[in-house]
Image (cartoon, rainbow, N blue to C red):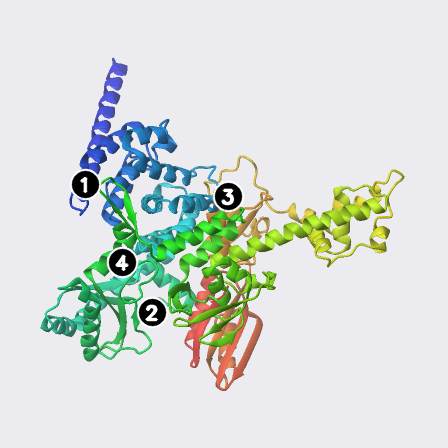
Amino acid sequence: MDELKMDNQMDEDKMLREEADDKLVNDAFQRLLDSYLASRHRKKVDIITKAFHFARQAHKGVRRLSGEPYIMHPIAVAQIACEEVGLGSTSICAALLHDVVEDTDYTTEDLANIFGPKIAQIVDGLTKISGGIFGEQASAQAENFKKLLLTMSEDIRVILIKICDRLHNMRTLASQPANKQYKIAGETLYIYAPLANRLGLYKIKSELENLSFQYEHPDAYNSIKEKLRNTEADRHELFDQFTAPIEESLKKMGIKYEIKERVKTPYSIWNKMQNKHVTFDEIYDILAVRIIFTPEKREEEINECFNIYVAISKIYKSHPDRLRDWLSHPKANGYQALHVTLMSKQGRWIEVQIRSDRMDEIAEQGFAAHWKYKEGEDGEYTEDENELNDWLRTIKEILDDPQPDAMDFLDAIKLNLFASEIFVFTPKGEIKTMPAGCTALDFAFSIHTFLGSHCIGAKVNHKLVPLSHKLESGDQVEILTSKSQHVQPGWINFVSTAKAKAKIQAVLRRVNREAQKKGEALLEEFLKKNNIENQPAIAEQLAKFHEVNSREDFFMGLGSKTILLGEKDLDELNGKNSNGKIGWRKLVPFLGRGKKKTAASKQQELFVVPEKFNRKKPIYISEENIGQYKFKHCCHPIPGDDILGYIDNKHQIEIHKRACPVADKLKTSFGNRILDAKWDMHKQLFFDATIRLQGIDRVGILMDVSRIISSQMNVNIHKLTISSEEGVFDGSIELRVHDREDVKAIMKALKAIDGLQEVAQIM
């Protein structure tokens, strides 16, 4: 009887849970429909409802790690695509169906038959780039990114929906173990946030950055959030006092406007604190003011921006070097606005951003969604030629190149993602957008590969300059060429654009391949002439003899005539036996004798990760086991730093700071090897830390510095370097400290010294 009661109770619980799930799913879908019906898009409710029911049936019975029904994820992605990016029915359907092909038995052909070729094509693109980001066997994200960009150049909605998918995954990241959180947060910061920024999705870019920051550096994130809360009342008061006379002036002008308070995000505040070596209290641009107006005539909106600028400049003094005009020449992501920095009555510089309602919508939601692809009557889109297309073409050219190294590829793309733009003119007066910091050679390659390959120099503003000359906004550039000029290896060091780097590397690879083939033929001929049988070990032995790193470099040297074969090479091979083969005695050095053995014996002390190692659990670093891990010189982590572990190719664990640039690449490309790592130290060991000092020189300042460090803080100074010139000194102090808290305490004490202007920690 009791068993029967238990079964009935279980059935009842199951029914209640299913009812709750159904209500949850139906409410979420109704919210999606309401958002879609409130948009400007044509109301294709039937196909969206059809896609929802299809996806719901396909994912039936599957749950996410958080415990909610899986269909909630596609609905959430569709909601973001509709409400936050402004996409239409085709994209909403594709978002609802984006995991169907990957996770169920349905194929792209099935979707094409039911929903049409356009939706199926977008879902196919999303399936290609997925690669199981949350799976244990996650493939290298650099390769996924490459696939993503390939599909993107066919239909940009693929990448827009992918960004929506990533945003929802970041919003629900709490259900993932810590090692997955670091991996996903890392690749979000490295790939998706700059990509969202490039596509004009500023709000999404900011949220992706903040969510990544929250998971990678939770203590720093919470600290900044708390400080923002504590200073909120002061900011509101400053905003009200600053905007009151501006509002009065705008009303007199008869402008329909809205003034918003814009607060710097925790991530951008933290970034500035790291880059400028300042505290939260020393950041003065946390508050900015945004004036959004509705023009009477759309063609007058640019003039109206300048009219508002003139009016507010009469109220407050403007900073002459901080006027940013993105009206006549919008940013490559479509952003248009006029930025001016004004001095408030409270003695604070405040940035004011002036933009029309249309400009604001493009800035918030992204021009790609609103006018790059506008859905026509048949669900197709029209394409406008603009800066984004140039960027897509550049990527396509890089992708067409025969398989560059995945990490080099990512770096090249990232160069262009992050680059701020300058405007450069051709001899005919045509304007070209280029990344800041680019050279004359970058400009040559941006016009045509042939022009770049044969470039010998340039005329900038009618003056002759070398290839490495850095261009500035407004420069007029004429490229000079010669047929006798060819790509040089050194060029790679002074180009900065992805296209130029890719083309130079492609040409050099082709030249190197030809030289290697020539070198192999020369060695074959040399050995044949001296009756020696050719074996792979011979090339390795001769490479070592000529002190080159590999047999490939040796062949290249032979082919390019920098290495010549002769009598000494025959002497090196004089251990050959009667049948013409190299004697065993001569091959012994390749077996790793001498120094290599010693290194191997040292490596045995390091912890080797076993096959069935639980990667979800954190590793704890203590005084007892610290010698078992590799501490890399790229970031010098010490106790107190946010850290992670990385399982290298030898199955040993490297320790990096989570903010380390090397760790960023590892998280992006080898996410399944990332481990959560924590400190368990008790101030017993000492670690090196370097502090940089800058300030106004005076008698006794060095004595004050050493007194605070040695006497007051009781810390040992390991090394001190200082120089003074024209009353300004610059120096660095190497200290032995227990942890990051020691460094913070020392820096705080040093900042109190009269004359010290900057105290910063060096990596």
In which quadrant of the rendered image does the N terminus lie? top left
Q: Residue at x 54, y 58 (%)?
A: 634
Name which residue lies at 34% across and 32% down. Answer: 100
Query: Left or right: 708 with respect to 579?
Result: left
> Can the viewer see residue 227?
yes
Q: Which residue is mark 4?
A: 363
Whether 335 is drawn above or below 406: the answer is below
Q: Earlier in the sequence, mark 3 or mark 1?
A: 1
Q: Disc 1 marks which residue?
A: 31
Residue type pointed to by label 4: Ala
> Which element type, helix, strand or loop, lies under badge 2?
loop
Query: Closer to the camera: disc 4 or disc 1?
Result: 4
Q: Is residue 708 above or below residue 447?
A: below
Q: x, y (%) of residue 700? A: 50, 84
* Amino acid found under the numbered disc labelled 1: Arg
Q: Does label 3 or label 4 sit earlier along the sequence?
A: 4
Gap in Å between the C-alphas at discs 3 and 1? 39 Å
User: Dot 1: within a 10 Å radius of its alpha carbon, few (fewer than 14), some, or many (20 or more) residues?
Assistant: some
Tell me the residue that label 2 is attached to.
283
Q: State the CA–CA distance, disc 4 to disc 2.
A: 24 Å
* Residue located beneath label 3 in the image: 673
Left or right? Give the position of 555 relative to 412: right
Specify which label sits upstream in the sequence, 1 or 2.
1
Q: CA distance from mark 3 to mark 4?
A: 37 Å
Specify the amino acid type for callout 3: Arg
